[in-house]
Image (cartoon, rainbow, N blue to C red):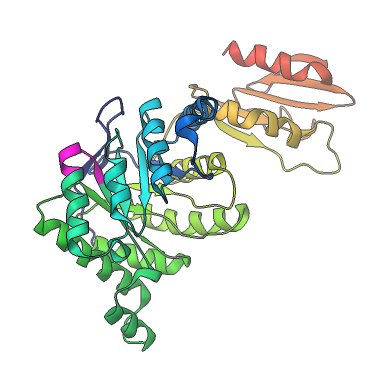
């Protein structure tokens, strides 16, 4: 029997103060998120660090990031988070656990959304306080559920084998959503995170078959770069092709840049994003006459940040050069200390390898 899933309603993220407004759900494009990897204690009183964070946020936005989440474990971090929110137009999310007062503090600034796990926030009156504050400030909420926060009764069913963990995650999320519905608050999204690809798929399918609430999709604790990319690609591609997933985060034990780049590539391959720079590069072999890896390390982020709809080929030798890269708008390859720049398969420049970057940039800018 063909599975049927609800089209999610639309939720507004940001739009308060200086913050850009983004719509999630409905027929809106799938958004890409990442998470800040360092603590932010002391940023409030350190203009140099604040400026560095602002600049990195801008770089992540250029790469294709739409939303960034920050861990806020204490009041000092909350104060710094407010200053970071004021310093950028990108929608930022405060990640709150255990202490609902941290959420209330963050909402004194132009925060776009609050991420809470109602299972560890405490009594209902605390959840209600956060909901009311978000309503007053025009901020959204992300309900985050994971296997460590299952209610006692559902945990017992899972442990006894009477319920799958995926269904328990979906049911836990549904219970939290019911509270928000009772409070007449609908500006929220849901995430159900598991470290298993299949559990992630099953939980999101189960929830999407019952509710029209936007889903934030991610495989939690997915692992280092290669492991995390594989798990996220398998889970996301399956769900996105079913129309499930309004916003995504690729969780990697790696840089935010790699999370964003991976997310963008998954969306492109699933037909959910178009345009921008497409990179084609050879894996390198014993014929290598050009340092593909070094060139890509220097140029990848810069290329992917460009507002050009082009294909760029980086090839290690003349075998994989203009021939296999002939479809590219621009490409580079080399041999014997020389680099060749080609466009649509035709060589346009041959230069010493030491001049390759400068000449490549000249030809790139001419497109």
- Which of the 4 image quadrants contains residue 147? bottom left
At 22% from the left and 54% from the top, the residue drawn is: 213
Picture coordinates of residue 78, whole percent (x, y): 38, 42
Q: Quadrant of the C terminus?
A: top right
Q: Quadrant of the N terminus?
A: bottom left
At 27% from the left and 31% from the top, the residue drawn is: 21
110 in magenta? no
At 45% from the left and 40% from the top, the residue drawn is: 268
At 35% from the left and 35% from the top, the residue drawn is: 91
Picture coordinates of residue 148, whole percent (x, y): 40, 70
Quick one: 37 or 279, which is closer to the camera?
37
Q: Is residue 357 above or below residue 191?
A: above
Quick one: 327 or 300, which is closer to the camera?
300
Q: Is residue 363 above or below residue 17?
A: above
Whether residue 166 can be seen here: yes
Quick one: 353 or 9, which is closer to the camera?
9
The residue at the far right in this view is: 336
All told, the count of numbered labels is 0
Quick one: 136 or 186, which is closer to the camera?
136
Picture coordinates of residue 182, whole percent (x, y): 9, 59
Left or right of 161 in this view: 360:
right
- The magenta-colored residue range is 134-140
Whether residue 1 can be seen here: no
- Which of the 4 image quadrants contains residue 199? bottom left
């Amino acid at each position: 029997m063909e599975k049927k899933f609800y089209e999610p309603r639309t939720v507004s993220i940001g739009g308060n103060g200086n913050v850009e407004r983004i719509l999630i759900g409905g027929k809106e494009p799938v958004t890409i998120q990442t998470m800040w990897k360092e603590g932010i204690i002391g940023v409030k009183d350190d203009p140099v660090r604040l400026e560095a964070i602002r600049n990195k946020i801008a770089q992540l936005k250029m790469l294709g990031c739409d939303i960034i989440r920050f861990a806020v474990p204490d009041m000092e971090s909350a104060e710094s988070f407010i200053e970071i929110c004021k310093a950028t137009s990108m929608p930022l999310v405060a990640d709150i656990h255990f202490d609902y007062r941290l959420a209330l503090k963050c909402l004194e600034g132009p925060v776009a959304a609050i991420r809470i796990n109602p299972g560890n926030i405490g009594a209902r009156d605390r959840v209600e306080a956060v909901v009311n504050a978000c309503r007053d400030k025009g901020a959204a909420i992300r309900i985050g559920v994971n296997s460590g926060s299952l209610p006692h009764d559902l945990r017992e069913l899972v442990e006894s084998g009477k319920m799958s963990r995926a269904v328990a995650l979906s049911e836990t999320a549904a219970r939290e959503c019911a509270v928000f519905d009772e409070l007449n608050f609908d500006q929220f999204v849901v995430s159900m995170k598991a470290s298993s690809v299949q559990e992630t798929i099953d939980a999101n399918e189960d929830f999407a078959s019952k509710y029209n609430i936007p889903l934030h999709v991610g495989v939690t604790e997915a692992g280092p770069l290669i492991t995390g990319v594989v798990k996220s690609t398998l889970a996301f591609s399956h769900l996105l092709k079913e129309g499930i997933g309004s916003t995504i985060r690729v969780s990697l034990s790696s840089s935010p840049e790699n999370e964003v780049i991976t997310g963008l590539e998954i969306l492109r391959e699933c037909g959910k994003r178009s345009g921008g720079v497409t990179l084609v590069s050879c894996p390198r072999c014993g014929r290598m006459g050009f340092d593909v890896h070094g060139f890509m390390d220097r140029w990848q982020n810069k290329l992917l940040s460009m507002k050009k709809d082009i294909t760029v080929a980086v090839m290690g030798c003349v075998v994989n050069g203009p021939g296999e890269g002939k479809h590219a708008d621009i490409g580079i390859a080399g041999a014997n200390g020389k680099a060749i720049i080609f466009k649509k398969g035709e060589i346009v420049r041959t230069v010493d390898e030491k001049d390759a970057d400068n000449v490549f940039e000249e030809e790139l800018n001419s497109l």
